[in-house]
Amino acid sequence: MSANMEPCLEIRSLSAVLPNGQRVLRSVSLTVQPGEVRALVGESGAGKTMIGKAVLGVLPKSVRIVEGEMLIEGEDLGRLDAKARRTLIGARTALIPQDPLTALNPSRRIGPQMTDRLVRILGWSGEKADKRIRQLLDEVQIREPERVLKCYPHELSGG
């Protein structure tokens, strides 16, 4: 790996609090280099989802970041306006929640839900988005991607 290659994601000493001063994140630091895969593991309430939501900029209104930095490929998310942040994040990141039932709309098929984001956020054509979704499913070794994309979320097992 080249010495000048920026980390994909870098979180430096991130802390966040509730209005009563209770800390929901305490000095979290994390670096993900290109090609690495990381998983956040911990007990319920440890802050895994809060970290993901902080990076995506979708923390609950009651949670306030009080210190730290979050960078995607060297871009400081705290210095970007809302539109620039959405564009950068939409192109390079995703949050995979613990509970898959909250991740997808149960009344829509999986395929359109996945491609809609690429079309809406990145401005891709439906055909380009569809092709990329199939590539991603292949990369993570989802069997029968054509069938999966036509399913409703409840039709797939949690395993």
Image (spheres, grey):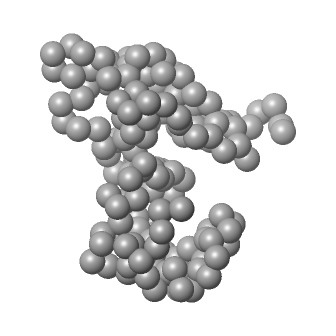
At x 74% / y 37%, what residue is drawn? 5
Q: Quadrant of residue 52?
A: top left
Q: Please name whichever residue, 111 or 65, is drawn nearer the observer in this view of the structure.
A: 111
Q: In the displayed image of the protein, which residue is found farthest to the top?
A: 21
- Residue 104 lies, with reference to residue 83, above or below; the image says below
- Residue 23 lies, with reference to residue 107, above or below; the image says above
Residue 78: horizontal and vertical position, in percent?
Answer: 39, 32
**One can see residue 89 in this view:** yes
Residue 139: horizontal and vertical position, in percent?
Answer: 69, 66
Q: Please name whichever residue, 132 or 73, is drawn nearer the observer in this view of the structure.
A: 132
Q: Please name whichever residue, 26 or 3, is drawn nearer the observer in this view of the structure.
A: 26
Left/right placement of residue 60 relative to residue 96 reads left
- Residue 9 lies, with reference to residue 84, above or below; the image says above
Image quarter (top left, top right, bottom left or bottom right) of the C terminus: bottom right
- Residue 72 lies, with reference to residue 29, above or below; the image says below
Q: Please name whichever residue, 2 or 102, is drawn nearer the observer in this view of the structure.
A: 102
Image quarter (top left, top right, bottom left or bottom right) of the N terminus: top right
Count of residue discs: 0
**One can see residue 78 in this view:** no
